[in-house]
Every structure is written in structure tokens, then in C-alpha cells.
Amino acid sequence: MNASQIENQIVSDTKGLPVEILQEILDFIQFLKIKKRNPAPDSIQSDLTNLELSEFQHLEEEFVDYKSAYPVE
């Protein structure tokens, strides 16, 4: 199927659906458009490389003495 055929099939398959279902379909389409514009990073590593030094130090401080503060029972 090409893009035009798929679009026509979607229009055909959505005719007669309740408004609530049509709204869900629209929400999903909008979600997909946003996802395409802003793809998720491949891994947490890409997020961590974008941290500034102060943010990294703050993150490290969060885990100081972690085992004592949160012992496993």
C-alpha cells in the first residue's frame, strides 16, 4: 500500500465511529507527530553527556551514603 491508499483506508475505517473513538485516534496521530519531531534519545548516556558539571555533582550527592540511608531489609 502506498501513502495515499493508507490515508484513504484510515478515512474509510473511521467513518461512523463514535466521537470518543475519533478523538482517541486524533490524539494518537498527534502523539506520533510529536514523537517523530522529538525522537527519544537512544540511551541514558546521551542525557548524561548533556548534564552540566554542577548538575552532575548534584546527582552524585544524591547517592552519597545511599546504602546506609536505604538499607535492604
Image (cartoon, grey):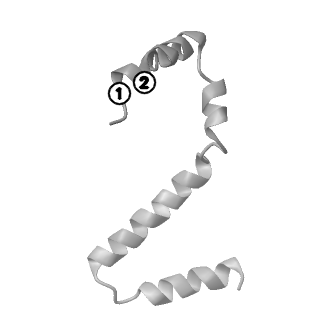
Q: In the rendered image, which quarter is residue 27 located in?
A: bottom left
Q: Position of residue 52 (x, y in %)?
A: 59, 15
Please give left or right for residue 19 compared with residue 66 in the image. left
**52 and 18: which one is in front?**
52
Identify the element where label 2 is drawn: helix
Q: Position of residue 68 (x, y in %)?
A: 38, 20
Please give left or right for residue 3 compared with residue 32 in the image. right
The number of discs equals: 2
**Which residue is under mark 1?**
70
| Up/down of 71 relative to 55, above or below | below
Where the N terminus falls, by quadrant? bottom right
Q: Which residue is drawn at 42% across and 24% down?
A: 67
Q: Where is residue 18 in the image (x, y as percent from the top left)?
A: 28, 83
Under mark 1, the amino acid is: Tyr
Give the CA separation, mark 2 to mark 1: 5 Å
Please give left or right for residue 52 compared with residue 14 in the image. right
Identify the element where label 1 is drawn: loop
Q: Position of residue 61 (x, y in %)?
A: 46, 13
Q: Residue at x 63, y 42 (%)?
A: 41
Please give left or right for residue 1 compared with residue 17 in the image. right
Q: Residue 67's mark?
A: 2
Q: Residue at x 72, y 81 (%)?
A: 2
Q: Residues within 10 Å of mark 2 (few under 14, many from 20)?
A: few
Residue found at the far right of this picture? 2
Q: How crowded is mark 1: few (under 14 residues within 10 Å), some or many (20 or more)?
A: few
Under mark 2, the amino acid is: Lys
Q: In the rendered image, which quarter is residue 36 located in?
A: bottom right
Q: In the rendered image, which quarter is residue 42 located in?
A: top right
